[in-house]
């Protein structure tokens, strides 16, 4: 295999995934505003373009043109570094997500940037690093609200990371591999019946993952780090213009990544929910692109659920948040591990 | 390719370690330590120990250092003052460091002649091999270590508990 060809194709893949990812980030924001609007019985953005579809473009242009203010008391190196860390971590973990069947063309995987046999661990590692973006932003801003937001978020993310990691062990036990491609392959046999969520008996794990993921991404009902009624804006109070936009993009990017991981681990990834009931299409392009369609549809449903929860569930109190994470989610996740391993030992 | 990456990340690692000592603000030192940990993870990855690299990132860079920065932020520790250091440290300390480093490196270089080189990828590297060794062959020491950690946790809880608080 030619090295330069490999490099060129990899750069192309990265560029394509980046463009699609950032566009979906922008449109997830619109989706959220629309859906929350409907939940609250109003229209949401509807003026720019048909159904407000051009709103993300206008928002982007607005954020670019805003004045970029740096307050006098901030600790500048870290203040500038923090949004970069947040956005970087958000973009990094999408690199190991496989979007479609592992089709190789001239020795290069087509629907995945990098196929690693520890893909799941990489995602967990990046998640654990992404705390720094928020923590440093709050600390370097030299603002008491920012600092409170950052402290809350570090404590929350460290606590829920444990439940998140433990909830995935059941899936790994069933697969016997940390490779995301292998995890999907195990679920691809009988369509919806062999998904980890249903056939794999990982419903409890899915619930724990869902809750912990909401907390990890600082989303409602666990959005205490930016609880606007108490902390004005939380950790990003002192940020403006594109630096604020970077935090915003990081948050929605994390939502999408979490949706991708949930799809791969519990919802059968790119495989069709009907299994072999529908014969595979004859056309080779349709055959290659159908899995991506299923993948996107599953991620979309997950994002829909995310926004639905945000629109309907009230925010937790801080002690409730900590108690819930440590006293209920972590023991439940351990119970799931013990149960899964017992079942696997009895019915090998 | 591997050599170039090794040189880059070894340089990162050393620069982070030196920066850790030179910085006066605790949070900068903590961040330098994160750089050291992450470059170490990349070095493990270059040796073919993928699981070890991921564990290094998740446990050290992700969990331990987050607690460090959390404590620094919570206590709002200020900058340290630069002192000139003791004269004894300068006169005896630096030569002692040079001597110790020299002794260690000569011993290692001597031993290398007899032992020959070993690359990490020859041994236990994959997640499966690693777990087989940990949970089969070394089960007792492994479990004893976890009991040790449990004792430490219980000790911390006992110390942190307020007197007379039921």
Image (cartoon, coloured by chain):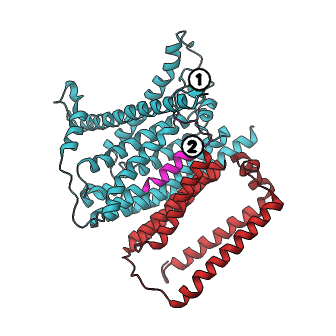
Chain colours: A cyan, B red
Residue A287, image x and y in percent?
53, 16
| Residue A224 visible in the snapshot | no
Return the residue at label 2.
A120
Q: What is the secondary structure assignment of the residue under circle 2?
A: helix
User: How many numbered markers are drawn?
Assistant: 2
Magenta span: chief secondary structure? helix
> Label 2 crowding class (10 Å Cα cut-off): few <14, some 14-19, many 20+?
many
Tell me the chain of label 2: A
Residue B84, image x and y in percent?
44, 86
Asked if residue A199 is positioned above or below residue B127 in the image, the reply reads above
* The quarter of the displayed image where residue B100 is located: bottom right
Q: Looking at the image, which is closer to me, B49 or A207?
A: B49
The answer to whether residue A115 is magenta is yes
Residue A213, image x and y in percent?
45, 47
Name the residue: 41% across, 47% down: A88
Q: In this view, does A233 lie to the left or right of A336?
A: left
Asked if residue A94 is positioned above or below residue A324 in the image, the reply reads above
Q: Looking at the image, which is closer to me, B155 or A19?
A: A19
Q: What is the secondary structure assignment of the residue under circle 1?
A: loop
Numbered range of the magenta stretch? A113-131
Label 1, label 2: how far apart the Cα atoms are: 26 Å
The image's mark for residue A106 is: 1
> Label 1 crowding class (10 Å Cα cut-off): few <14, some 14-19, many 20+?
few
Residue B74, image x and y in percent?
39, 71
Name the residue: 29% across, 58% down: A234
């Amino acid at each position: 295999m030619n090295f330069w060809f490999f490099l060129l194709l990899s750069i192309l893949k990265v560029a394509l995934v980046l463009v699609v990812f950032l566009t979906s980030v922008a449109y997830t924001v619109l989706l959220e505003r629309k859906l929350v609007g409907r939940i609250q019985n109003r229209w949401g953005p509807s003026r720019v373009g048909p159904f407000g579809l051009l709103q993300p473009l206008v928002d982007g242009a607005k954020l670019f043109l805003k004045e970029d203010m740096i307050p006098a008391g901030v600790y500048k190196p870290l203040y500038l570094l923090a949004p970069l860390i947040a956005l970087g971590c958000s973009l990094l973990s999408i690199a190991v997500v496989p979007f479609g069947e592992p089709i190789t063309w001239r020795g290069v995987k087509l629907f995945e940037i990098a196929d690693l046999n520890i893909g799941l661990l990489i995602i967990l590692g990046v998640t654990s690093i992404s705390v720094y973006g928020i923590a440093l932003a709050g600390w370097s801003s030299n603002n008491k609200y920012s600092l409170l937001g950052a402290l809350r978020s570090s404590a929350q993310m460290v606590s829920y990371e444990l439940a998140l990691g433990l909830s995935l062990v059941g899936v790994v036990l069933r697969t016997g591999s940390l490779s995301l491609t292998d995890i999907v392959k195990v679920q691809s046999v009988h369509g919806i019946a062999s998904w980890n969520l249903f056939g794999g008996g990982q419903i409890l794990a899915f619930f724990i993952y869902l809750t912990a993921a909401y907390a990890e991404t600082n989303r409602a009902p666990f959005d205490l780090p930016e609880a606007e009624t108490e902390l004005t804006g939380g950790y990003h109070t002192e940020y403006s213009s594109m630096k604020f936009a970077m935090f915003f993009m990081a948050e929605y990017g994390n939502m999408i990544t979490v949706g991708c991981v949930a799809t791969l681990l519990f919802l059968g990834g790119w495989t069709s929910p009907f299994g072999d009931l529908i014969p595979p299409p004859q056309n080779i392009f349709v055959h290659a692109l159908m899995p991506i369609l299923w993948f996107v549809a599953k991620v979309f449903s997950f994002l829909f659920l995310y926004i639905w929860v945000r629109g309907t569930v009230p925010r937790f109190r801080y002690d409730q948040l900590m108690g819930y994470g440590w006293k209920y989610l972590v023991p439940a996740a351990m119970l799931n591990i013990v149960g899964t391993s017992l079942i696997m030992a009895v019915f090998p | 390719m591997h050599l170039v990456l090794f040189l880059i990340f070894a340089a990162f690692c050393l620069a982070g370690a030196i920066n850790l000592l030179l910085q006066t603000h605790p949070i900068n030192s903590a961040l330098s330590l994160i750089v050291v940990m992450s470059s170490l993870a990349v070095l493990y990855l270059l040796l073919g120990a993928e699981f070890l690299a991921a564990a290094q990132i998740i446990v050290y860079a992700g969990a331990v250092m987050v607690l460090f920065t959390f404590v620094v932020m919570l206590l709002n520790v200020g900058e340290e003052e630069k002192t000139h250091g003791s004269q004894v440290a300068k006169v005896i300390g630096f030569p002692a460091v040079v001597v110790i480093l020299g002794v260690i490196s000569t011993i290692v270089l001597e031993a290398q002649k007899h032992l020959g080189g070993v690359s990490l990828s020859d041994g236990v590297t994959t997640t499966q091999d690693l777990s087989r060794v940990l949970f089969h062959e070394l089960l007792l020491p492994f479990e004893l270590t976890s009991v040790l950690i449990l004792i430490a946790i219980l000790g911390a809880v006992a110390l942190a508990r307020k007197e007379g608080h039921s």
